[in-house]
Image (tube, rainbow, N blue to C red):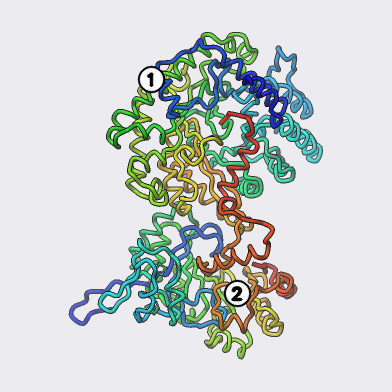
Amino acid sequence: MSEALNIIKDPTLTYNQELIALAKLGENSDDTLVYSDEYYKAFNSRALCDLGEGKMPYRPRYICPDYELLFEKGCKFLELDPPKDLLEAINVLEIFYRHVPSITTFPVYLGDLDKLLEPFVLKEERSYAKKLLKLFLLQIDKVLTDSFVHADIGPEDSVTGRLLLELSEEMQLAVPNITLRYDPERTSDDFALACIKCMLKTAKPSFANHRMFVKEWGENYAIASCYNGLLKAGGGYTLPRMRLYECSLTAKDTEDFVNRELPRYIDLQLEYMDKRVKFIVEEASFFKANFLATEGFVKEENFTGMFGVVGLAECVNHLLGIEDKKKGFGINKEATALGLKIMDVIDERVKAHVAPYCEATDHRYRLHAQVGINTDGMDDSPGTRIPIFAEPTMLEQLQTNEKFHPYFPTGTGDIFKFEETYEKTPEAILPIIKGSFGRGLRYFSGYLENCDVVRVTGYLVKKSEIEKLKAQKQSLNNVTVFGMGAQDGAHALDRRIQRHEDNSTGQ
Amino acid sequence: MRSTAGYSVMKITAPVNKIIPFSNVDGPSNRMAIFFQGCPFNCRFCHNPETIHMCNDCGDCVKTCPVGALSLKEGKVTWNKDLCVNCDTCIKTCRHDASPKVTRMTTDELMEKILEVSPYIQGITLSGGECTLQKEFIKELFPKVKALGLTTLLDSNGSLDFESNEDILEYCDGVMLDVKAYNKEFSDWLIRYPNDVVLKNLDHLLATGKLEEVRTLIFPDRDKENEATVRYVAETIKDRCRYKIIRYRQFGVREEYRKELGDFTTGEDYAMRYVELARSLGASKAILV
Ligand code: SF4
Ligand code: SF4
């Protein structure tokens, strides 16, 4: 059977997924873009990965349109006038979203929804505004069926922001992803708390360190896809990744890796990025003919390339011969120090490389800690995260993250689990976010752990008691078989993301 | 402690059983909770009986530790933190309601730990065991903690008479006080310590504005005793501070006492009755935990 026939006959794919898969097949039938033999060798050994971008990029990977311009001027190509009320605003957005391409074919950035819609929401009765927003969110969830569809809110409190939180809780929809751009000086504690409460119940919004992003990008940045920092009216051309664990396999030792293998792989990934960026700008019709470009919703000079890495923990542990990950990267000081050294090498080398068509980022690519895809298995932990099941205390996890997050202007993040009692004490989470953002954490996601045992107050919980309790709990509900894996929150969450990810390749 | 020859001052230390860097259940917001070893009470329901007494170096647990994390050195039990796998076999072995996993720390050593966590917390809570057994240590520690802009709370069973120990409260933002039993007879049986001082502290802390919260445990099927305690506390504190009504839970309770008190957790509805009682008596900040 041909690959096309396989796709067509596959009963597990929706029509839309078949369409995407067949398009990818068509794209991959062209060999215009060629790389060095060295590159293909690295690609075939899985050291370098193109994250399913395909052979012939016909649009940038991520596009963050200037929705403010859309509301100001309307869109000639789509024959849309600037909206005059909330109903029109929502209608304009829904139509426009359908025409924003990306690697996933769905828009990865829906705009700063609270700011965009607030003037219109304020003109309506709250209940009517809420009803319209509810239909808007429903439309997004059912039509833009991809968990990399992302909306931003904040830093300031707003009626629209509050309504979006309320609706997220009420509707429990997977799409869109939401990020609060958090700045302790501009975001009130009250609004931040409302976001935390919603986050504990729905795993969104996540918190982005607004000051950190502003310092790197200026005010005009967007959080798109999973947690990518990019410019509005711009985006990201391409996001390949170095699978650092696989990269480390060809090194004789740490010295050989840091001084020879690592720089070699970096250069190969840069070669790949340069060729693709040039192709997108010079050959593909996107920047010349697509209405997004011709009407100024995106500008080529606001795009950059995202240099991705994944699996730093496994890379370091392999180089140091550490088999027990509970004694490795993130826990063991020597391992963490080697991680920092590797990141310094990557950072310096990428910064030394003059990148084509990256005007807004000083003609440089920017680093991205890639979150992993479902085919990675346990070989490569997301970006620079400490491996699942090896996470130390939250304090240590934060301290490690704070060292690594500053390297990644185009995005990184970590997920923190909270036991059930936090549902009643969300205010205990805010100082953690404030403290860590002041110390270099870039992006914070949290959720409630479905935990059997919680500490009530004033006394300690003993491990032996926890085990007894778990045993009891299991006998009480012997229908529910809790495997270790299912009990681990992070794993369960990953699984949930993957379920919605389905066929998409976006990160 | 001063040595007789000259005035060289020995550093004050306190036995630390455990430090929880981030706690959301030991006072408001995010706090570092520090648990000291040793308690003058011997409550039947104690959830952490291993924190009651100081280790007497009998050496029993040294023999049962599966990983050799414990050893006897010059008659003293020493614990190797790095080897320990936290299986709690030692705690099960110990017949003295003690633990070998206790570290003596000076205030400077503890401050180092606090400093590391300080960016993420609103304050610290000292708990136990009974923290006020370490009153000299606390007097030295709290001014240093306040200097970092953190709040300072004590989680206390009320065994120390605060009125005659005013100086411990000077740098303390508040006390979370357990009022375990009002009925004298019940109290003598339950905590095995006179409760007059606890009730006196309740008044004194209220009067001085240092009462952060009061907690009372609700035991299964002890209507009379539960009611007496809740009634007294509620009528005393009214709406002036938070009142946590906590369900008795059997976890960690010594087996012989579990038989007396119940090998199960107080029902939620049953406990809720006392929350409502407290509220009806004016304790509007009564909540169920
Ligand atoms: S908990 Fe006690 S018995 Fe278990 S390893 Fe640690 S010291 Fe040894
Ligand atoms: S902890 Fe208990 S068993 Fe171990 S030496 Fe001390 S008193 Fe003995």
**Position in image of residue B286 (x %, y %):** 67, 69
Q: Which residue is situated farthest in the bottom direction here?
A: B185
Say whether residue A151 is visible.
no
The residue closer to the viewer here, A98 or A487, is A487
The residue closer to the viewer here, A421 or B193, is A421
The residue closer to the viewer here, B197 or B53, is B53
Pointer 2: what residue? B250
How many numbered marks does the figure carry?
A: 2
Mark 1 residue element: helix
Quarter of the image that includes the N terminus of chain A: top right
Judge from the rendering whether residue A337 lies leftward or rightward of residue A414; answer left or right.
left
For disc 2, the neighbor class at 10 Å (few under 14, some 14 to 19, many from 20) is many
- Name the subunit of mark 2: B
Task: Tell if the residue under mark 2 belongs to the same chain as the one under mark 1.
Answer: no
**Position in image of residue A400 (x %, y %):** 42, 46
Judge from the rendering whether residue A328 lies leftward or rightward of residue B251; answer left or right.
left
Label annotation for residue A473: none
Q: Quadrant of residue A87?
A: top right
**Position in image of residue B243 (x %, y %):** 64, 70
Does B118 appear above or below A438? Answer: below
Label annotation for residue A38: 1
